[in-house]
């Protein structure tokens, strides 16, 4: 079974956020992603499941705690 991985730009459009925000979410392990060396890719099906499940909130809501 072959899955097509997409880049941060496609996920940013899906979530209506900036590409940098998508990378931030991946770095914080909030959004499902795959690292291929220095490249970060996303399985669109897993991201959609994450969205359908309501996502994982950051500690303290959408504000990071110090």
Image: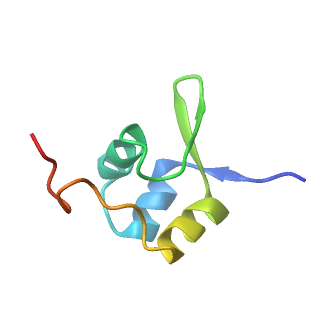
Whether residue 2 is situated above or below residue 34 in the rendered picture: below
Q: Position of residue 34 (x, y in %)?
A: 60, 40
Given residues 10 and 34, the one toward you in this image is: 34
Q: Residue at x 32, y 43 (%)?
A: 24
From the viewer's perspective, tell me whether residue 34 is left or right of residue 23: right
Q: Residue furthest bottom?
A: 52
Given residues 8 and 31, the one toward you in this image is: 31
Displayed quadrant of residue 54: bottom left
How many marks on residues?
0
Q: Residue at x 50, y 73 (%)?
A: 53
Q: Position of residue 7 (x, y in %)?
A: 54, 48
Whether residue 53 is situated above or below residue 61 in the rendered picture: below
Q: Position of residue 46 (x, y in %)?
A: 62, 61
Quarter the C terminus occupies = top left
From the viewer's perspective, tell me whether residue 65 is left or right of residue 35: left
Q: Residue at x 38, y 43 (%)?
A: 23
Q: Residue at x 57, y 69 (%)?
A: 48
């Amino acid at each position: 079974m072959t899955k097509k991985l997409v880049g941060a730009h496609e996920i940013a459009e899906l979530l209506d956020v900036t590409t940098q925000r998508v990378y931030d979410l991946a770095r914080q392990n909030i959004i499902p992603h795959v690292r291929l060396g220095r490249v970060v890719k996303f399985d669109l099906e897993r991201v959609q499941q994450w969205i359908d499940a309501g996502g994982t909130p950051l500690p303290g809501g959408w504000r990071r705690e110090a």
